[in-house]
Image: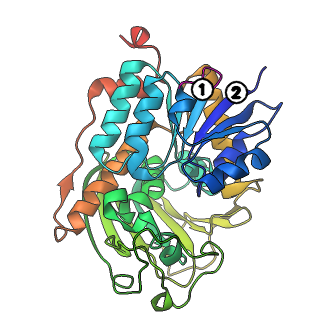
Amino acid sequence: MEDLRIGVIGLGLRRNLATAAHRPGKGSVVAAVADVDPQVRAQVPELYEGAVAVDDYKRLLDDPSIDAVIVATPDDTHEAIACEVLEAGKPAYVEKPLGITVEQCDTILRTAYKTGTRLYVGHNMRHMGVVRLMRDIIARGDIGEVKTVWVRHFVSYGGDYYFKDWHADRTRTTGLLLQKAAHDLDVVHWLAGGYTRRVNALGDLMVYGDLPRREPETPRPDGWLKEFDWPPTARHDLHHVVDVEDVSVMNMQLDNGVIAAYQQCHFSPDYFRNYTVIGTEGRLENFGDSPGDEVRVWNTGPSGYRKDADVVYRVPEAQGSHGGADQRIIEEFCRFAREGGVTDTSPVAARMSVAAGALATRSLREGGMPYDVPELEPELLAYFDGGQLPRTAVE
């Protein structure tokens, strides 16, 4: 089997996706990279032997030797670039979030449907060991029928990662309740077995609104990804536009009746993502999300508070970034690009997580007003849920 030749558009913070895809002789190689930064392009030959670097992504679309494309550009560019990739007939991997509005997501889905080109969305948390472990526990019925899900997300480095570049500008992201939370909202939907139907939220820019900012067109300081400022109020060199919330809470009612909640804070001292899932016969909770960390299950009672759970599971060991999830999601994408078929990730689910985050962001900026998530067109639901079969087969 010849290696799948992959083109990468954007080699920034998600460079590890390209690295996971470059496996010469083992199924896939990075054959070309498009990036507007000349310093990034200069690194390509050393990073991916045999790959070419270009400044215009359209050259990848015109190259018949490129079999599939990874789109890892800033969020506000996903709609335009993804649609061009699909219209060029090349299977597309779009890094999460799929778009920054519901309308953008729906445009991408319609383009994939009309062209018949395979679309894949990079919700790699579905391949993380901790998420798959929790889902397996729920599927076995160990906690009964899921009724509520709570997520707390403490982002210790949020002020450095999300307030020193374009992430802090709502015109580029809508907000961090969409951009940063898209993964978690997708996991909530996956664990609960439904999609958000109604949402409301509260939030504010509580810490980073008044801190020193860089002038427009000024590059980020050297070492910004390695040398974090502390305490949060000591942070400086923020992006010249900072108008997204640094703390937010949202409530969700899913279409199957499950009630869920998500909380996000970007000025906590530690990084921690905590899921609590309560069913009719027990609850589970994760303590960390890395290999070797624990998922604990309480399914006897009633009792007072018990630190020791009834059952404790270890998150399985894995190699590579994000607990092995990046490697597994690239393997699934390559298989999908070659053969098609149903995948663990879902373009519909990706759209639904964006919709929940976008409507929650609208809610928190309008005093907590609840909003209903717009439904997706039935033909698109059928097409993507059916594994993106050729339209003649669907019809």
Residue drawn at the location 32% of the way across and 63% of the way down: 170
Disc assigned to residue 215: none
**Label 1 crowding class (10 Å Cα cut-off): few <14, some 14-19, many 20+?**
many
301 vs 51: above or below: below
- Label 2 vs label 1, nearer the camera: 2
Q: In this view, does 47 lie to the left or right of 367?
A: right
Q: Can residue 259 be seen in this view?
A: no
Q: Can residue 338 be seen in this view?
A: yes
Magenta segment includes 65: yes
Q: What element carries label 2?
A: strand
Is the magenta region chiefly helix, strand or loop?
loop
State which region is magenta.
62-67
Amino acid under disc 1: Ala
Q: What element carries label 1?
A: helix
Disc assigned to residue 4: 2
Q: Do the residues labelled 2 and 1 touch (CB within 8 Å)?
A: yes
Mark toward the start of the polypeptide (2 vs 1): 2
Magenta segment includes 219: no
97 vs 64: above or below: below
Q: In which quarter of the image is the C terminus?
A: top left
Q: Is residue 337 left or right of residue 363?
A: right
Residue drawn at the location 70% of the way across and 56% of the way down: 321
**Residue 258 in the image: x percent, y percent?**
34, 54
Amino acid under disc 2: Leu
Residue 213: image quadrant is bottom left
- Return the residue nearer the eye: 73 or 394: 73
Disc assigned to residue 337: 1
- Return the residue nearer the eye: 22 or 292: 22
Residue drawn at the location 31% of the way across and 36% of the way down: 106
- Return the residue nearer the eye: 276 or 374: 374
